[in-house]
Image (cartoon, helix red, strand yellow):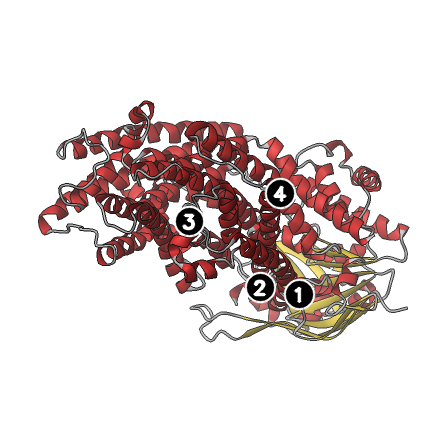
Amino acid sequence: MRVRRVWYAVRGRAYPRTVGAAREPSWIFYDLALPILGVLAFVFVYRALGAPPQFTGYVIMGGATVAFWMNVMWNMAAQFYWEKHQGNLELYMMVPCGLVPILLGMAAGGMLATTVRAAVVVAVGVLLFQAPLAVSSWPLFALIFALGLVALYGLGMFFSSLFLLWGREAWHLVSLLQEPVYLASGFYFPVRALGMWVGMVASLIPITLALDGLRQVMFPAFHRGLLPLAWEVAGLALLAVLFPVLALRMLRFMERLARQEGRLSFRW
Amino acid sequence: MLARALRTARVGFWLGWQVQSNWTDPFLFFVYSIARPLGGTLILVFMFYVVAGGRRGPMLDFFVVGAALWPVVVWAMQGLAWGLLEDREHFKTIAYIYTAPVPFWAYLVGRGLASAVVALPATVLTLTVGTAVLRVPLILSPDRLPALAAAFLLGIAGLVAVGMTIVGALFLISGEAWRLPDAVGQGLYLLCGAVFPLTVLPGWLQPLTRLFPVTYWLEAMRRILLPAGAVHSIPGLGDRAVPGALLLATGLWVLVAGLAYAAGLARARQKGILDASTGY
Amino acid sequence: MPPAIETEDLVRTFRLRRSRQHPSGGPVVALDGVSLEVPRGELFGLLGPNGAGKTTLIKILVTLLLPTSGRAAVEGLDVRTQAQRVRERISMVSGGEHSGYGLLTVREQLWMFSQFYGIPSGEALARIDRLLQVVGLYQERHRKVQQLSTGMRQKMNLVRGLLSDPRVFFLDEPTVGLDVGAARDIRAYIRTWLADRPDRTILLTTHYMSEAEELCDRVAIIHRGKIVACDTPARLKQAASGGSYFLLDTERLDGADFLRRLPGVARVDSVERDGQTELRLRLAEDGAIAGVVAELTRHGRRILRLQKIEPTLEDAFITLVGQRLEEADQEVIGE
């Protein structure tokens, strides 16, 4: 009964996002053609520097990863900011299913565009720039990808709790977590270049370990990972448990705080 | 009419400043205006050092200056667009501002200029860090200052023109409208020599890069700020020709902006969607 | 069986940030010891000016806001500690609501919300269609939300509120901003819904006197966070019946202060309309009207109409609060 209720709520909230994508087809342009441009710029940066072709592979993987990061941050974490302004947040707070299924529905609804975006980036990288993307072990690749995704979406839920309390400040916090995260997680270069200690701290962001692990699987002879692959997989598994648990606690705490401070709506 | 436009632009500037700088926590504002641009610059720096094996080189200077100026490009251009979108989608005040007896374009220009000013701390900081930490050989001698000021102001005019062209399109787009300014920014990032010389691009893209005032602005600023021997994005263009090209491109885009704005606005009024908002 | 709604010494304060408008910061008391009991099956009204605390009270009862102190319960469930269970029994519709997703159709929008209540799709769509027919929106079911007029949107919101068949239904100024026809339709449906479900309860906030009088079994008048009276509309009007009420139309007056000084005149409210002045007089006794007529004649004003009337809920409000609803609104704005 409870599982069914959760499923109904997830599909309910995913619906406007999927239908919206079909009714506003401009996302095809924004999520297929234009994300390529930012990726291409970094490819050309490496070309201007005369870098080996594996660096093109780094950029392509980083560009694909940006799609997931943006989905988590903007379509999930920051969504409550928009919902509050639209007046929907109050309604979501009053429904019995709770916030978690609604958040999952938002993420699921945005997954289509995200997956397409990532796939197109990879396709362009391979076809246009002959990026040397070859997977040495598909099971390992799938495991790292899955663990990274679960941890990442747990982190997204954690951040979404901030928006229950904050308004524009939380929006800007999420906005802040773009370039600094791309830097710290080594989206476009091996994270090891930042030094071991910075890399270890940055590993708290699931993307750092996921990206580094995936690169070890894809460039086993070329890429020097931050940590041995087994350790990175274990770290990701830990984060995949830690962040969802933290998120659930944080959501409950923030909801209570928001109700106490009267921040769930703009009218008393 | 000019006086009214200036007055309106001043009000738009004031409002843009209130909106952009109205942070509950000033520290967050400072971090946001600094951390993101600096983060973008450091990505390029580390990309450089990973390939160059930790050694310096003229490409590093190219990156730093381009990355330092990029926030001004983005914020000035997007400031106009975001002004329209916020008033339409978020604050829902567009109907009231538009129907007031003021030139609406001037109001948007004011909003754009406020954004450009908000971007300046990021530019200054990046150049400072570049000079102090990365030893970028910036030249800020008094004899170059008039050229620097003229190029900078002309560049702002060009950016406002590009932003106004985007506004013309945004009048007719809802739903995904908020993504268009970002998308144009990404396109310009690739095509204007922001972080790599345009000579790296395939030959068939080169003519496209010459169409934008941003291309010449970035080139002009690099040639003024960096010493002889620095990497040029457009090596075939002499130092004296760059300001002329910037002036010409800016003038053309001001015309394009005027046409796009007028056409977009007329069509939006015809369809009755000037103040329509959607969200999913 | 516990009452539908119960509050005990409910207090809610808000801390203001220090600013030029509020240099000392300091708390704003939105609710100041509110104690209420609403039995099941009642349509209970909360009447008061803007800023009186009506919305604050509703938000506490629908679990959006925690009280600073005191207790509130819905069907015996504490809103503080049993919020999730409360949510299964309630729903809320506010006036001027612009929530929703513009790109969805009416039917889709409503279906989405039904899913949050765990209603199977087939059953949900059947309920939606039935409710849309009742409120006269069935023809628009495939129209996108962004294309709806204000009245249609509010009808859709009303359907959303009723989809889950709530045991306690909260209506926060549901007809604000609507035209006469749409407001009338909504009020009519509210009455019908409750008549068909005698075990359900509605709490309605409004600052329309006529709406409270028309719909509510009992009305609580709230002012500055306090309940100043709570009774049936008829008994509240009786409380204002000390004295006589007259409507008097005369030629245009420049102020009515000279009338207020007359013996036996308790209150004078004047409205300028079409070059005439309409006076609403509350007098200590019928005989005092002669003095009013004489004074107007002395000022050279003809009497165009004179009528004795029964006290209204507005008169009760004035008696209890000391000013008209519009004046109380203005006072809050001035603060």
- Circle 1 — which element? loop
- The residue sitting at the left extreme is B143
Please give left or right for residue C19 compared with residue C103 in the image: left
> Can you tell which quarter of the image residue B25 is in?
bottom left
Give the chain of mark 3: A
Q: Residues within 10 Å of mark 2 (few under 14, many from 20)?
A: some
Q: Which residue is mark 1?
A: C65
- Residue that label 4 marks: A139
Residue C28 image point, x, y percent: 57, 72
- Asked if badge 4 and badge 1 are on a common chain, one would say no
The residue to which callout 2 is attached is: C256
**Image spot of residue C291 (x, y percent):** 66, 68
Mark nearer the viewer, 4 or 1: 4
> Closer to us: mark 1 or mark 3?
3
How much space separates mark 3 and mark 4, taking CA atoms? Answer: 23 Å
Query: Which residue is more in the foreground, A33 or B50?
Result: B50
Q: Which residue is mark 3?
A: A190
| Amino acid type at mark 1 | Leu
